[in-house]
């Protein structure tokens, strides 16, 4: 929780700024509330799990975002830490209002994609299916659609290697393939996936490229020169891989990569 002095500063902020903070919450999905308490404006969403709160030390900042969702807090680990609101997993300092707005938007987007919400959606949507082959096909289609939607949200609709944002050119790539996953939870976990352009997806899925622990691309000796040029492997940026993804990428390197 913020100190008493910070609480007093927030209470003395101009009404217009407090209104802007409330608008930042509402415009990015947090429309239940806001409620003011202990120096924070708290709000929730009817669709995204987890409460968020915003605050400010003064009219020109710094600004603060506090999140209840532990997974979202871990994704924000690179941001400067700040004291969290009571009961929240973490809080982060932002230097200006635009950065706060972007962070609120990211919190909503991430909370819609991180475990366990995609799995919960999948279990709800497949609850009435039986055990026939047709049911299995339907279950897989539903799961892959949910997984794709979660990856689009998690990666903000952009292939991290190419910058491509056209949905028709993006593929939801499993690191450990659907059939090899130990559970539905792993199949629907965004940390078991990458949002890749169609060419990168084909190369990754066929084991012609993989990534090391630092997210750097590794080309197979089986990758033809023309394909390597088209992929631009030598100038491809590193992937941002969390620990959960690195473990699965190790599996990909061992079991699928054509060294």
Image (tube, grey):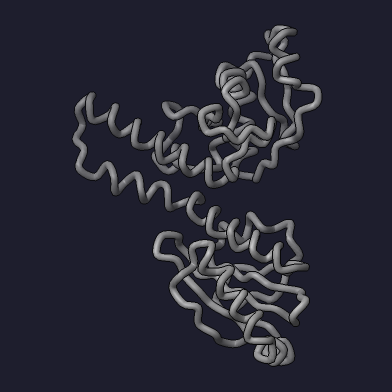
Residue 120: x, y in percent? 36, 51
Residue at 60% across / 87% down in the picture?
38
Q: Which quadrant: the N terminus? A: bottom right
Question: In the rendered image, is residue 255 in sight?
Answer: no
Identify which residue, 38 or 116, lies in the foreground: 38
Residue 215: x, y in percent? 72, 35
Residue 193: x, y in percent? 55, 36
Identify which residue, 24 or 71, lies in the foreground: 24
* In this picture, residue 58 sits left or right of residue 48: right
User: Which quadrant of the figure has residue 224?
Assistant: top right
Residue at 54% across / 76% down in the picture?
87
Q: How many marks?
A: 0
* In this picture, residue 107 sits left or right of residue 231: left
Identify which residue, 180 or 198, lies in the foreground: 198
Q: Residue furthest front?
A: 16
User: Which quadrant of the figure has residue 155?
Assistant: top right
Q: Which quadrant: the C terminus? A: top right
* In this picture, residue 130 sits left or right of residue 92: left
Q: Residue furthest right?
A: 234
Question: In the rendered image, is residue 242 in sight?
Answer: yes
Residue at 51% across / 51% down in the picture?
114
Residue at 52% across / 29% down in the picture?
171
**Depicted 48 relative to depicted 36: above or below:** above
Residue 85: x, y in percent? 60, 78
* In this picture, residue 32 sits left or right of residue 124: right
């Amino acid at each position: 929780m913020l100190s008493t002095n910070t609480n007093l500063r927030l209470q003395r902020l101009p009404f217009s700024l407090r209104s802007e903070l409330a608008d930042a919450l509402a415009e990015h999905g947090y429309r239940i509330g806001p409620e003011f308490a202990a120096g924070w404006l708290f709000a929730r969403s009817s669709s995204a799990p987890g409460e968020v709160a915003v605050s400010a030390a003064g009219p020109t900042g710094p600004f603060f975002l506090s999140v209840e969702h532990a997974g979202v807090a871990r994704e924000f680990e690179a941001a400067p830490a700040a004291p969290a609101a009571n009961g929240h997993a973490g809080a982060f300092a932002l230097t200006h209002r635009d950065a706060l707005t972007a962070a609120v938007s990211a919190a909503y987007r991430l909370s819609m994609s991180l475990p366990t919400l995609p799995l919960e959606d999948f279990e709800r949507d497949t609850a009435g299916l039986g055990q026939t082959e047709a049911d299995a096909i339907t279950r897989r289609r539903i799961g892959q659609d949910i997984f794709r939607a979660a990856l689009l949200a998690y990666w903000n609709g952009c292939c991290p290697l190419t910058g491509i944002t056209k949905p028709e050119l993006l593929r939801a790539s499993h690191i450990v393939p659907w059939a090899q996953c130990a559970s539905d939870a792993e199949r629907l976990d965004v940390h078991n996936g990458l949002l890749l352009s169609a060419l990168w997806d084909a190369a990754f899925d066929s084991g012609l490229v993989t990534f090391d622990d630092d997210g750097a691309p590794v080309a197979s000796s089986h990758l033809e020169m023309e394909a390597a040029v088209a992929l631009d492997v030598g100038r491809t940026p590193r992937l941002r891989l969390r620990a959960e993804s690195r473990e699965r990428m190790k599996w990909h390197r061992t079991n699928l990569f054509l060294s």
